[in-house]
Amino acid sequence: MKLLLRALVSPFRSTASARRSRIAALVRACVIASMLPFAALPLAQAQTMPPGAKQPSDFPRAKLTAGMYVIDAAVAASDADREQGLMYRTKLAPNEGMLFVFNENAVHCFWMKNTLIPLSIAFIRADGTITDIDEMQAETENNHCPRNNGVYALEMSKGWFAAKGIKPGMQIKGLPRAQ
């Protein structure tokens, strides 16, 4: 901005090189000023969904309960939806998460590649019982696997389960039927 002001208030000189110099300073100042709104954004917010990625509003929703808490869960029940999960998302609402529904009772592992926000994950049996809860850091490729078989996994903002007192052995209600 100082360059812009200096270029605007400097006395006009008659030489062509002085005019070119003022014009160059104006161009630089405009380029810098145009970048300021993006400089304040974290990298995660500057990224956009890649072509072909499903928008958050396009996932089916389920209303789940964990104790007295109501959860608004996007449901990922197809291979493509489970593969994308919460990738590319920059935020979740306070009681929003994603429920992964699997077709088989097995150990289903997760990682956080292209997932921009840290998450907590609860692994759940077909009867709704939480077997394991794990904390996951954003944009890592560490495997997060439960110790027990299950057909569901529920991802929430990091620390959500601990903050609500939700532990293994407790029930999640309202789960859609696994295929």
Image (tube, rainbow, N blue to C red):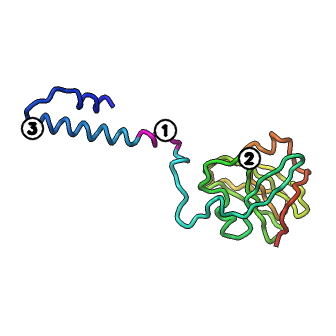
**Disc 1/disc 2 C-alpha distance (Å):** 28 Å
Between tags 3 and 1, which lies in front? Answer: 3
Q: Are marks 1 and 2 in contact (CB under 8 Å)?
A: no
- In the picture, measured across the screen, residue 60 lies left or right of residue 4, that is right
Name the residue located 13 percent from the left edge and 34 percent from the top edge: 18
Tag 1 secondary structure: loop
Q: Give the labeled residue for mark 2.
A: 135
The question of residue 107 being in magenta is answered with no
Q: Residues within 10 Å of mark 3 (few under 14, many from 20)?
A: few
Q: Which residues are magenta?
A: 36-42
What amino acid is at disc 2? Glu
What amino acid is at disc 3? Ala
The question of residue 41 being in magenta is answered with yes
- Name the quadrant containing residue 73: bottom right
- In the picture, measured across the screen, residue 47 lies left or right of residue 34, that is right
Q: Residues within 10 Å of mark 2 (few under 14, many from 20)?
A: some
- In the picture, measured across the screen, residue 124 lies left or right of residue 82, that is right
Q: Give the labeled residue for mark 1.
A: 40
- Name the quadrant containing residue 54: bottom right
Please state, as top left, top right, bottom left or bottom right, where the N terminus lies in the image. top left
Residue 16's disc is: 3
What amino acid is at disc 1? Ala
